[in-house]
Image (cartoon, rainbow, N blue to C red):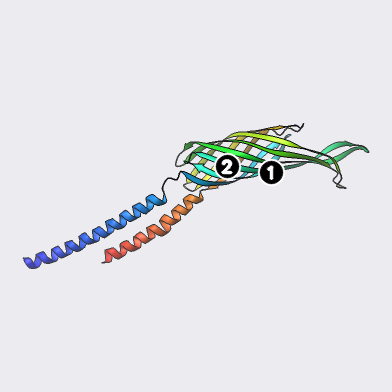
Amino acid sequence: MLILIIPVMAISQINMARQKKTDSLLAKLKADSSHIYRFQKVRPYLSIDNRNSFINRQAVNFKGLQAGVILHEKHTLALGLYKMSQNSKRSVKTLDGVKTAERSVSLNYLTFFYQYAVIDKRYFELDIPLEIGIGGYDIKFQDTATGRIYKEIKGGIIPLGIGIQPVVKPLKWVGITFLCGYRFVASHTAVNFNGLYYSIGLTLDIRQIIRDINYRGFKKKRYHSKLRVILKE
C-alpha cells in the first residue's frame, strides 16, 4: 500500500508545483496587460488636417498640421498651422486699360484648437472641435504673360471655427473620420473667407498599435513559450 501511496504523492506534488508556476505566470501576464493598457491622463496628439471648402463658390483646400495633448481621453488641446492658396482669372482695371490677370489668394494662420469627445465607445466616437486663430491674407493680381503684379492687398485675419466629427472605429487602432463645420473669418477685405468645410480621413492610433505589438507580439508569446516549458517538466 505504501508503495502505491508514495508515487501518487510524488505526482501530486509535481502537479501542485506545476500549477503554482502556471498561476504565477498567468498573474504576471495579467499584470503586464494591466500596465500596458493602463489609462493615461495625458498623451500626445498629432494630426494632419486637410479640409475641403469653398471661397467665392470656388473649391479650395486647407492644408494643416495640429500638435498638442489629449487629457483624460476627453479633451484635446492643440496648436494648428494652416495654409490655403487659390488661383483664378479676373479682369483688372489698370492704367493702360482693362487686363485679364490671375488672381491669387493665400491664407496663412495659426489656431488654438480644442476638441471635446461627447461620445467615446468601442466602435464609435463623436467629437466637437472648436478653434480660434490669427493670421494673414495676401491677394495678388498678376499678368500671366509678363509676371507683372498689377495689385497686391495684404491684411490680418481672425479665423473662428466650429464643427462636428463622427468617427467610426472598425478596429481599435483604426478610425474613419467625417468632419463637417463652419469657418468664420474676420478681415478687412471684400473677399469673403467664410464658409463650410468638410473632410473625410483615416486615423491611426499609434499608441494602440504599440500596445498591441508589446502585449501580443512580446509578452503573450513569452508567456506561451514559458508555459510549454512548465508543462513539459
Disc 2 and disc 1 in contact, CB within 8 angstroms: no
Residue type of the residue flagged with mark 2 = Ala
Given this view, does label 2 or label 1 mark the residue nearer the observer?
2
| Label 1, residues with CA under 10 Å away: few <14, some 14-19, many ≥20 | some
Q: Is residue 213 left or right of residue 23?
A: right
Residue type of the residue flagged with mark 1 = Lys
| Residue at the image point whose x is 55% and y is 42% from the top | 177
Q: Quadrant of residue 190?
A: top right
Compare residues 102 and 138 and report the one nearer the observer: 138
Q: Where residue 29 sits in the image (x, y, percent)?
A: 35, 55
Q: Quadrant of the C terminus?
A: bottom left
Q: Is residue 87 left or right of residue 210?
A: right
Q: Secondary structure at mark 2?
A: strand
Residue at the outermost right position: 96
| Residue at the image point whose x is 76% and y is 40% from the top | 138
Compare residues 52 and 106 and report the one nearer the observer: 106
Q: Where residue 100 sits in the image (x, y, percent)?
A: 86, 40
Q: Is residue 99 left or right of residue 138?
A: right
Mark 2 → mark 1, Cα distance in angstroms: 17 Å
| Residue at the image point whose x is 51% and y is 38% from the top | 75
| Label 2, residues with CA under 10 Å away: few <14, some 14-19, many ≥20 | many
The residue to which callout 2 is attached is: 78
Q: Where residue 192 sits in the image (x, y, percent)?
A: 73, 32
Numbered label tally: 2
The residue to which callout 1 is attached is: 83
Mark found first going from the N terminus, 2 or 1: 2
Q: Where residue 205 sits in the image (x, y, percent)?
A: 51, 48
Residue at the outermost bottom position: 3
Q: Is residue 99 left or right of residue 9?
A: right
Q: Quadrant of residue 197?
A: top right
Q: Secondary structure at mark 1?
A: strand
